Image (cartoon, helix red, strand yellow):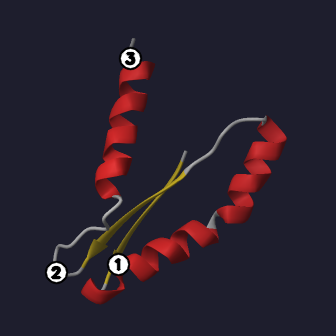
Amino acid sequence: MLTDVAISGARNVIKKEVEKILKYKDLTTEIQRMWNVNTKVITVIRGATGTFSKSLRKYLRLYSLIFLLLNQ
């Protein structure tokens, strides 16, 4: 899991999220090939006015699941 956090202008939240996912695409592919593991890019983008990307809720659920699995 690769996590990137950014603060963006209120109107650029979706654009910044896509930019971050594309930024790590090559690294994700390389990690998958080298280590034979699944990887996921998690972006947490907060707008300057307090807005968050729509996918934040999905990512938080994923974090919760991973935390539960690791602490069994």
Left or right: where does residue 12 sit relative to residue 25? left
- Give how far apart the Cα atoms at labels 2 and 3 are: 35 Å
Q: Which residue is mark 1?
A: 13
Disc with the residue nearer the chain's start (3 vs 1): 1
Q: Secondary structure at mark 2?
A: loop
- Residue found 62% across the figure and 71% down from its top: 23
Mark 2 or mark 3, earlier in chain: 2
Point 63% across, 64% down: residue = 24
The residue under label 2 is 49
> Considering the numbered disc 3 on the image, is that residue within a helix, a strand or a loop?
loop
Q: Are marks 2 and 1 in contact (CB under 8 Å)?
A: no
Where is residue 50, by image quadrant?
bottom left
Farthest left residue in view: 49
Which residue sits furthest top?
72
Image quadrant occupied by the N terminus: top right
User: Marks 2 and 1, Cα distance to the nearest angstrom?
Assistant: 11 Å
Residue that badge 3 annotates? 71
Looking at the rendered structure, which numbered label has been put on residue 25?
Answer: none
Q: CA distance from mark 3 to mark 1?
A: 33 Å
